[in-house]
Amino acid sequence: MRKFRMGIFIIIGILCLTALTYAAIPRVINYQGRLTDKNDNPLTGNFLVTFRFYDADKAGQAIWEEGHILNIKNGMFSVLMGSVKPLEIDFNKDLWLGMEVSSDGEMTPRIKLASSVYALNAKSIDMISSNQLLRNDVDSVMSG
């Protein structure tokens, strides 16, 4: 009986840890794009693409950089930025994304990052106390 109880506690512990890992916010950014040559023809093949974040729209030093070899088909690509080098960046300020394909130099203009609806909702929830989330107008008397 004692082994049975211990087994139950271990299973409950594993389930709790699994739930915590699912609750973690992913620290990657999904970015999709279309890559063409100078004549607007879509590219196909494997290309080294370097992504950089800057705190200025022009000039300045990169505050984060990560390279990916992307398999581009008909110009379309998708990448998870932060999957190679962690995104340890302060996202509470304006940031711009720069991209460089192979060694052709960085493309212009840089792309300003914008908030997603999910992130805006998370920011508003952050400012609300638990008292504002809990209802206190509910009668605890049950009938029926």
Image: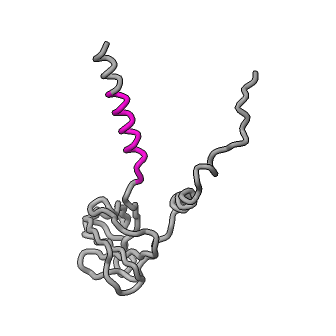
Q: Quadrant of residue 39?
A: bottom left
Say which of 21 and 115 sits in front.
21
Q: Percent position (x, y) of residue 55?
A: 39, 79
In this image, 106 relative to 92: left or right?
Answer: left
Most common SS among magenta residues: helix
For the N terminus, which image quadrant? Answer: top left
Image point 37% across, 44% down: which residue? 21
Say which of 82 and 102 sits in front.
82
Q: How many marks?
A: 0
For the C terminus, which image quadrant? Answer: top right
Q: Percent position (x, y) of residue 136?
A: 69, 43
Q: Which residues are magenta?
A: 10-25
Query: Where 14 falls versus 90 (above or below)?
Result: above
Image point 40% across, 64% down: which residue? 31
Q: Is residue 21 magenta?
A: yes
Q: Percent position (x, y) of residue 33?
A: 40, 67
Image point 39% across, 83% down: which residue? 108
Q: Looking at this rendering, what residue extends furthest in the top direction?
A: 1
Image point 39% across, 43% down: which residue? 20
Say which of 112 and 132 sits in front.
132
Q: Percent position (x, y) of residue 7?
A: 31, 22
In this image, 88 relative to 124: left or right?
Answer: left
Query: Where 29 falls versus 136 (above or below)?
Result: below
Query: Where 75 falls versus 11 (above or below)?
Result: below
Q: Quadrant of residue 87?
A: bottom left
In this image, 136 relative to 100: left or right?
Answer: right
